[in-house]
Image (tube, rainbow, N blue to C red):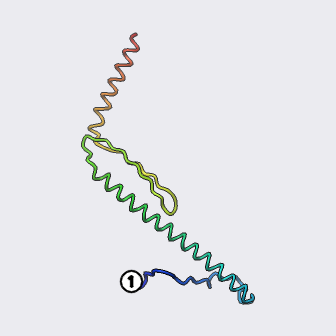
Amino acid sequence: MSENDQRGLRRISTEQHLPVGFEQLPEEDRRVILRDLAAKQAEVLVDTTRAVRKSQIAENDLHVHNENVARLDHEKKIYSSKISAETGSGRIDMQVRGGDTRFVVPILVVVGVILLAIITVFALR
């Protein structure tokens, strides 16, 4: 672990966010303001960390999903895959469709011929 990595509790500096005239306030008011600032900064830090973690988890999930799709046997098969991932800034819905097009075209031709035959039969009645 490097020196820049910190674990556990961290000291939060509130001095750069102090209001103008802070020094002239009574000691009790200063203490209340400092406590509120520290609480708000801690809340922002927690929310930011949570959003970053969600994004990292979503990135990993999408990467694993893409690897699994790449490993599929594409010959004479059609596949459809859908995944949803929650990130720190929203939600990602990804749908992947694919397969062997040489397999799809003959199936579509056969279905088309059958539909034409059915239409012809009903038209000649």
36 lies above or below 58: below
Q: Quadrant of the C terminus?
A: top left
Instruction: Determine the image quadrant of residue 98.
Output: top left
Q: Position of residue 33 (x, y in %)?
A: 68, 81
Q: Position of residue 38 (x, y in %)?
A: 61, 80
Position of 92 with respect to 96 (left or right) is right
Instruction: Determine the image quadrant of residue 97.
Output: top left
At a point 52% along the width and 82% down the height, the residue shown is: 10
State the residue lying farthest toward the front.
Answer: 8
58 lies above or below 27: above
Position of 27 with respect to 108 (left or right) is right
Dot 1: within a 10 Å radius of its alpha carbon, few (fewer than 14), some, or many (20 or more) residues? few
Q: Position of residue 17 (x, y in %)?
A: 64, 81
Q: Position of residue 47 (x, y in %)?
A: 55, 69
116 lies above or below 73: above
Position of 71 with respect to 41 (left or right) is left
Q: Nearer the viewer, residue 83 or 96?
A: 83
- Secondary structure, mark 1, is loop
At a point 38% along the width and 62% down the height, the residue shown is: 60
At a point 50% along the width and 68% down the height, the residue shown is: 50
85 lies above or below 46: above
Type of amino acid under label 1? Ser
Q: Quadrant of the N terminus?
A: bottom left
At a point 64% along the width and 79% down the height, the residue shown is: 37
Residue designated by label 1: 2
Instruction: Determine the image quadrant of residue 46.
Output: bottom right
State the residue lying farthest toward the top.
Answer: 125
Please state the total of marks drawn on the protein image.
Answer: 1
